[in-house]
Amino acid sequence: MDAHPVSFTSAAERINSRIWKDLSAYRHFAIVQKLLQEDISGTVDMAAKIGKRRAQILSRPPRVGIVGAGLSGLRCADVLLGHGFEVTMIEGRNRLGGRVHQVSLTPGHLVDAGPNWIHGTNNNPIMELAQSTNTLTGSWTAKTSVVDETGKMLPPDEAEVYSDMMWEIIGAAFTYSNRNTSTISPDESLLDFFNRELTRRIPENSPDWEKKHKIMSQIAESWGAYVGNHVFSQSLKYFWLEECIDGENLFCSDTYRKILATVAKPAVERATFRYKTVVNKVQTSDDELCESLIVQTESGEALQFDEVVFTAPLGWLKQHPDTFCPALPARLAQAIRNIGYGCLEKVYISFDKAFWRSPENSENDKNDTQGFIQLLAPNYALESNPHRWNQEAVELSSFTPADSHPTLLFYTYGDQSKYLTSEVAKLSTKEKKDAFLYEWFKPYYSRLPHYNESSPDCQPVGCYATEWLNDDLAGNGSYSNFQVGLEEGDRDIKTMREGLPDRGLWFAGEHTSPFVALGTVTGAYWSGESVGKRIAQAYGRTVEGKVAA
């Protein structure tokens, strides 16, 4: 969730970094040169080179069915269309984009229902797309604002000390996990490491150690907003898989709208789209039988393809293991079960004015709140929040005039996400849903500077809450993650990434990306690109270029 760079491996250390070794291997895996040096002719044993099934259809363009028209599917289509394939996009929704989707919050202001961030700016194709499409991005120079459990804002200098310590511990955890993953118990959590570090960094003989330890323990819970689950469920053994591309993390203040349109353009112009079409069975065969793959839909259709790329979210794959016939190999089915799936949700609440900003909007004004806001373990809203869930928010009024708006964006995760989405789903109208959310979040936005309940500026005027947990096509959740108990996380990802090319079945999506981009838009984009190039290679097509510089 945060704009703090979640990349801690220096250039000098990358030779020993698992995540950077994987990225290098992934590039070789996806970037292939010309497979056939000879011209395709009768003098070449094509069956030996590319298999019987593929060899018998070289007289026509191969037909590829891509299940899911999100970023990974759209990027895969682009690559395949560029190499002469016929592409059909099969999408369960009535729109493209998948989780990348925009909604109207208030008149004139679109917001992203899905990803908000560009994770890492160095050698990131999504950053390059943002620049080429003039998509506005933003970041904050101000430090995180912290509201303590009593509802009082901590002094900025004190909040900065806690925030810096938190990120130092996160950096240490990445290093420890990377170096010791083979010996760390699968049952050990990030919270276990955090508590050990707190004992070392805040010894019992230090001034105010109890207060500092308590606040830092509460801040540790904020990691849930990054991965969609509680910090006590985050695997320490595979914490290194959470590291991202280096560079800044930028908020896509202009939304992903123009980036999505650019990625989708080749497919929109040249592929066939089948919207509102839900797949319930994929039948594959081995190379000896030389049979087409058959994709069956809920409406009873049977579509034939030479290759099928399945880009459904990991959560959907978990819930539908019987989709594939014959059944997926045991190791691949196990990999899908093993990797965790998050429950990150968002609530946007907009106002007439950004009352939390000082009139002068000065960064030196202690009452001017910019960027990130953490409200720790509140004990002042126990009736609505008896579990004292932390509240994590970012304010959106500090960008340029063209893309700022007086809105607070709350990120929820874990049990809080489950509770809020279930309660909102019970309400019959948008008015009732908004009223519930205004009331539920009021104890938190009312703790911000300059709040005055009688002022019109402090009254909410617009609201939007995501409901990915209630979305079957999204797999009832959001983004892969790595939870306590995971034993072979890196191998699981590689197994899903490999897919079943001999059977013409491929998998793409953020859960099959390079380790450094798991759970991100960049990861989805790279995974689709990789599969597109691998399919082209499987047919002896020349594939050149790079996944990343």
Image (cartoon, rainbow, N blue to C red):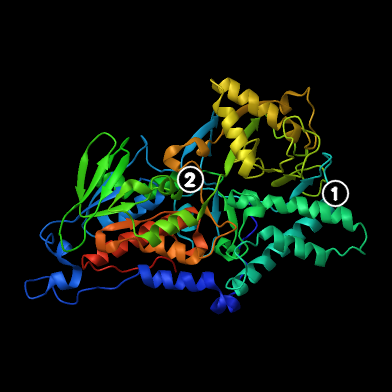
Quick check: 485 left or right of 197? left
Residue nearest the observer in this picture, 228 or 503: 503
x and y percentages locating residue 230 in the rendered image: 64, 50
- Which structural element holds mark 1? loop
Dividing the picture into quadrants, the one containing residue 434 is top right
Q: Quadrant of residue 35?
A: bottom left
Residue 250 in the image, given as x and y percentages of width and height: 58, 53
Instruction: Answer left or right for 223 relative to 96.
Output: right
Asked if disc 1 and disc 2 are in contact, CB closer than 8 Å, the reply is no
Query: Taking 165 as reference, is 229 above or below it?
Result: above
What's the residue type where badge 1 is placed? Pro
Query: Which sits earlier in the primary sequence, circle 1 or circle 2?
Result: 1
Q: What residue did someone put label 2 on?
A: 256
* Residue depicted at x 74% and y 50%: 144
Based on the displayed image, in which of its 4 quarters is residue 542 positioned? bottom left
As measured in the structure, the alpha-carbon distance from the residue carrying label 1 to the one carrying label 2 is 35 Å
Residue drawn at 27 percent across, 53 percent down: 326
Residue hosting label 1: 155
- Judging depth in this view, the residue of 400 and 51 nearest the camera is 51
- Mark 1, residues whose alpha carbon is within 10 Å: few (<14), some, or many (≥20)? few
Q: In the rendered image of this protein, does residue 271 appear above or below residue 383?
A: below
- Identify the disc placed on residue 165: none
**What's the residue type where badge 2 is placed?**
Tyr
Residue 410 in view here? no
Asked if residue 144 can be seen in this view, the reply is: yes
- Indicate the secondary structure of the residue bearing disc 2: loop
Q: Along the line of sight, which residue is nearer the eye, 429 or 349?
A: 429
Q: Position of residue 105 (x, y in %)?
A: 55, 31
Residue 45 horizontal/vertical position (percent): 11, 74
Residue that lies at the very extreme toward the left in this rendered image: 42
Quarter holding the C terminus is bottom left
Mark 2 crowdedness (10 Å alpha carbons): few <14, some 14-19, many ≥20: many
